[in-house]
Image (tube, rainbow, N blue to C red):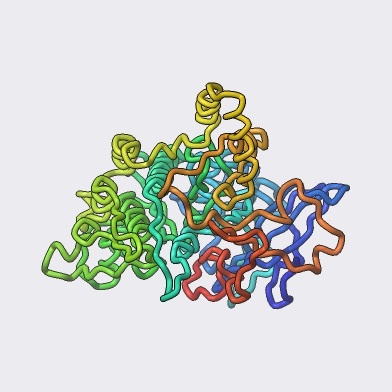
């Protein structure tokens, strides 16, 4: 599971928690300023008990802590996230030599437990590396959980199914679109809140954390099922290297001097002013995150990783707005399929050219709560323990013969592709109870892709002694794919998040 020697970090386990044996690092990808490896912690029986991704980055950004970020380091130390910023001063690194913005913002959004209620990828820790140089910059290492289920960009691409005359575009279920929008909107609410209540926050200036580079590839999928939409993976916002804590009166903001590292197709109107193009003349703020959220959702609806770039200089005001209301997504093989007007409406509102006309994150959540249940086919509760108990109650009315026939059918279809999502249920008993129901997901709510399978390297798996020299099964999982079917050899990198992809020229640390 080691990486080629040209990828530094494959043999550097510094910063990993002591105790047990760490095996690694398996190369996941890299590009620009960073390299990513995954490590596995095993006990005395070679059973995997923990997994961690290490992201090695080189930054030319100053390590001196700016005033806007004062107090965050101490908060990260309190959460146990300083893995060795200054080994000579554990937890007490000097302000002039400890600042790494990506870790500061990601750590601010991470709960003390190491998880996150902010719907963002949690930070496990960060430290300064040992390979800094003048040409590349300061070497930093961040440590995270392994989100093996891939990202939304890969997810969207997997809804383009192979057909006799080219690919067949299978629309992403509206229920999953609402779930994604809900996760992102709730994330924005929490990002706004934590920015305003952080240590030493300048509350009078109404500060915001602007993520800048929100896109499909920077939304990772957590395969762990929760209490809502348990048959679907959970989208989490990732990659905070381009983010800024700023406010309306920030000179860098209103003078258009903030560093903007975003992606083609995801430029909000207010960033057009940075490119000597005619924008609305507004500053970057929380509403910028709202616009990019709308663009992500529209990209999912159109199965397009990069919706067309808007011409902000157009005289016609309609050309500055999203076309989601006037040019609905169309699918040749599913011509009767349409997304609801309510979904298209909120996506359009999020992408208004004038930021003042966009809804706030809180207003998006309120809108979702008002309309979601009319269009999600109850997928928010489908598969929960309460829902399973309700279905079991209905089965209690079957006769003995009917129940025997039912149970036989349920066991016969237990291994079918339609139930593969059950592999991700953490509760084995709940999984078996669902199988016994003999119920498929409602038609039209099935995903074409459930995410990369967690096989051979899951918590609780036993690692063979020679596993470091063996290739790992790609384990991609699609609906209708046979257990023993593999992917094409040239598809091995599809599960590397775009931000980690070694072929991605837009990688930013």
* Residue at the farthest left position: 316
Quarter of the rendering occupied by the N terminus: bottom right
Q: Position of residue 106 (x, y in %)?
A: 52, 50
**What is the total number of numbered labels drawn onto the structure image?**
0
Q: Position of residue 124 (x, y in %)?
A: 63, 48
Residue at 45%, 74% in the rendered image: 164
382, 94: nearer the viewer: 382
Residue at 68%, 73% in the rendered image: 7
* Residue at the farthest front position: 401
Which image quadrant is residue 442 in?
Answer: top left
Question: Is residue 252 at least partly visible in the picture?
Answer: no
Q: Is residue 13 left or right of residue 466?
A: left
Residue at 61%, 24% in the rendered image: 400
Q: Decide: is 103 above or below 56.
A: above
Which image quadrant is residue 316 in?
Answer: bottom left
Question: Is residue 507 at least partly visible in the picture?
Answer: yes
178, 74: nearer the viewer: 178
Q: Decide: is 131 above or below 401.
A: below
Q: Is residue 187 left or right of residue 329?
A: right
């Amino acid at each position: 599971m080691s990486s080629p020697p040209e990828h530094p970090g494959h043999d550097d386990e510094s910063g990993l928690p002591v105790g047990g044996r760490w095996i690694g690092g398996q190369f996941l990808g890299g590009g620009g300023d960073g390299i990513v490896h995954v490590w596995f912690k095993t006990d005395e029986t070679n059973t995997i008990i923990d997994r961690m991704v290490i992201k090695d980055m080189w930054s030319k950004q100053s390590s001196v802590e700016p005033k806007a970020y004062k107090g965050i380091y101490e908060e990260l130390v309190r959460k146990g996230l300083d893995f060795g910023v200054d080994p000579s001063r554990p937890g007490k690194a000097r302000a002039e030599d400890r600042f790494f913005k990506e870790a500061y913002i990601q750590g601010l959004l991470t709960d003390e437990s190491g998880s996150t209620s902010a719907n963002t990828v949690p930070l496990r820790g960060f430290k300064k590396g040992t390979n800094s140089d003048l040409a590349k910059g300061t070497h930093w290492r961040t440590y995270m959980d392994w989100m093996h289920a891939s990202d939304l960009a890969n997810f969207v691409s997997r809804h383009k199914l192979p057909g006799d005359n080219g690919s067949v575009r299978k629309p992403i279920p509206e229920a999953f679109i609402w779930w994604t929008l809900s996760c992102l909107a709730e994330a924005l609410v929490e990002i706004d809140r934590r920015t305003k209540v952080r240590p030493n926050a300048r509350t009078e200036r109404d500060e915001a954390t602007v993520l800048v580079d929100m896109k499909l590839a920077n939304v990772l999928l957590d395969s762990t099922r929760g209490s809502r939409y348990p048959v679907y993976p959970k989208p989490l916002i990732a990659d905070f290297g381009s983010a800024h804590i700023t406010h309306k009166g920030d000179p860098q903001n209103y003078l258009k001097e903030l560093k903007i590292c975003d992606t083609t197709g995801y430029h909000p109107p207010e960033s057009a002013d940075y490119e000597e193009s005619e924008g609305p003349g507004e500053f970057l703020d929380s509403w910028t995150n709202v616009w990019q959220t709308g663009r992500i959702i529209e990209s999912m609806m159109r199965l397009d990783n990069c919706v067309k770039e808007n011409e902000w200089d157009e005289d016609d005001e309609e050309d500055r707005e999203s076309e989601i209301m006037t040019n609905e997504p169309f699918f040749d093989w599913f011509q009767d399929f349409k997304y609801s007007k309510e979904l298209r409406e909120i996506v359009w509102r999020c992408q208004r050219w004038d930021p003042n006309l966009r809804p706030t994150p809180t207003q998006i959540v309120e809108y979702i709560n008002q309309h979601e249940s009319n269009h999600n086919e109850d997928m928010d509760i489908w598969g929960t323990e309460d829902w399973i108990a309700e279905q079991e109650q209905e089965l209690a009315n079957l006769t003995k013969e009917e129940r025997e026939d039912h149970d036989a059918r349920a066991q016969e279809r237990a291994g079918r592709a339609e139930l593969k999502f059950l592999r991700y249920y953490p509760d084995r008993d709940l999984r078996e109870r669902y199988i016994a129901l003999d119920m498929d997901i409602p038609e039209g709510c099935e995903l074409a892709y459930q995410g990369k399978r967690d096989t051979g390297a899951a918590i609780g798996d036993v690692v063979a002694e020679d596993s470091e020299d063996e290739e790992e099964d790609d384990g991609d999982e699609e609906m209708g794919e046979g257990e023993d079917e593999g992917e094409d050899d040239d598809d091995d990198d599809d599960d590397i998040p775009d931000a980690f992809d070694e072929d991605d020229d837009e990688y930013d640390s």
